[in-house]
Image: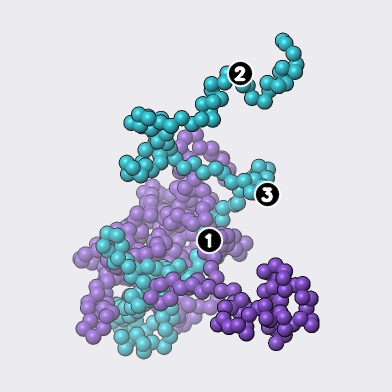
Chain colours: A cyan, B purple
Amino acid sequence: MADIQSKAQPYVFDLGHLMCSDANPLPSLAQEKEAVLTATARDCAQGLINQLLTTCTIARSSDGDLQIKLPDPSTRLPREKPVPKEKEKTKWDKFAEKKGIKAKKRDGKLVYDETKGDWIPKYGYKGKNMNDGDWLVEVDEKPERKKRAPESEGGNKSKRTKNGPR
Amino acid sequence: MLPIRQIKAKNARTKRYLDNKAPQVVENPRNTLFLRYTSCSEIMQLVLNDIHSLKRPLATKFTKKNSIHPFEDPSSLEFFADKNDASLMVYGSHSKKRPHCMTLVRCFDYKILDMLELYVDPETMRTLGQFKNAKAAVGLKPLISFSGSAFESPSENEYTLAKSLLLELFKGPDVEAIDVEGLQYMIHFSVDEEDNDNVKPQIHMRCYLIKTVKQKNSTLPRVDVEEMGPRIDFRVGRVREADPEMLKEAMRKPKNTEAKTKKNIETDIIGDKVGRIHVGKQDLGQLQTRKMKGLKRSRDIASDDDEEDAGVAVGSDVEMTDVGKRSKVAA
């Protein structure tokens, strides 16, 4: 690549755009115009491809093609449309931010069942909370006791008796 | 011209379209519109066709004649830009005064940002079809090169504008990675050196297929080029430079697009992530050294009896170590 190194001014590359800028003055095109142009173009192509292969990381993609990772473009070009305006925060947004309230994440209806090794619904038909197949289940005592005592009506009972008969 | 009324999406498809058209932080690639004036020479039409075929699929070509004079009244072009969501335009026209004229138009927010007229030299023009060889596949990102000192002029002139517009026109979509097989062709622009002040130097556009040959003594291949067309020589005509206020708005960078650099995390040449961790200062006072009778803490305190209250020695564990440390410092 002696012909490239002999250039007075080195090429400037913008690999994000696959661009090569050659600031050297063009040789005279008075004779053999096309040959001169082809030669300068070839030098540019050689320089650009050398630069691509030496400075960029080359990785094999999932389908087995060799991919050259390009850097971000350094030549700034004007935008097509203005920068999007930031949405104004609502009163609730400000309040939630102050209080640290975040939107609840919904984690879906399926849960992973390790015994089955599969995703099954949390509840409902064939749900996780339906222990089908277990013919003997231990009674959870607390709610069961509540169920059996129809008198208990929570904290309101004492107040009701104090109020007297209806 | 009346402003186009604000459309509110009535169904999901319209909403998707409008969301896609709305300003975005990371922008969609520009669409290019190809238009012609009421009179458009055959040469000009061939040029439009060829550039269109290089630009596919990010291009729309209109076949109807338009009587638009971009430098006098560009409102129709702005209307087309909005309707077609196209922010680049190639407008072909031909007249006695401006023969074989191609106008490159760049828009910002559906308003004309800058324009440049390029007059095609009809003598040297060769179309894509006139070169009988294989062509590059459609929609590939080309290599682009600019040769000649005029493109690198430090002050803004028609050649720096031409460089910016031609790069914008041909660069294709911005991508993060490119397939090695995708490096198929190069578009080369070169500009003559200025000989005399009367004639503006020509811009030569040449498209080449790229062939790589393995070299014996090097890992890098030798590159050969073969012209595939189109071959166009341009003279530069009228220019409309960007309004500085508008350009400033167009060059604005959206916030939060650059990733924050994390402190103490680096990637080395091989691509491994390397982190530096700061361990707090080690407390050497607590260091367990060799146990000997003479170094017992109880003895330590007994020797310091005259300074310290003897009651402290039977205090809590924490106090004891505290005293021990102090005595060591004193020693």
- At 23% from the left and 81% from the top, the residue drawn is B215
Q: Are marks 3 and 2 on the same chain?
A: yes
Query: In terms of sequence position, does the residue under pointer 3 or pointer 2 come before the other?
Result: 3
Q: Above or below — where is B245 with respect to B154?
A: above
Camera-nearest label, 3 or 1: 3
**B78 or A100: which is nearer to us?**
A100
Residue under label 2: A151
Position of residue B216 in the picture relative to residue A147 (left or right): left
Number of residues whose C-alpha sits closer than 10 Å to that of mark 2, classed few (under 14), some (14–19) or many (20 or more) = few
- Residue A67: x and y, percent? 32, 66
Name the amino acid type tagged 3.
Lys
Three-letter amino acid code of the residue under disc 2: Glu
Res. B101 in view: no
Classify the position of the C terminus of chain B by image quarter. Answer: bottom right
With B70 as the anchor, is A111 left or right in this view?
A: left
Q: In the figure, residue A10 lies in which quadrant?
A: bottom left
Q: Position of residue B299 (x, y in %)?
A: 67, 81
Q: Residues within 10 Å of mark 3 (few under 14, many from 20)?
A: few
What residue is at 41 percent from the left and 88 percent from the top? A8
The chain letter under disc 3 is A
Tell me: residue B305, above or below residue B39.
below
**Disc 3 to disc 2, C-alpha distance:** 46 Å
Which one is in front, B327 or B179? B327
Whether marks 2 and 1 lie on the same chain: no
- The x and y percentages for residue B300 are 68, 81
Using the numbered discs, state the Cα–Cα distance from disc 2 to disc 1 in whole angstroms. 65 Å
Residue topped by disc 1:
B257
Q: Residue at x 56, y 81 (%)?
A: B291
Residue assigned mark 3 = A98
- Residue A83 falls in which quadrant of the image? bottom right
Q: Chain of mark 2?
A: A
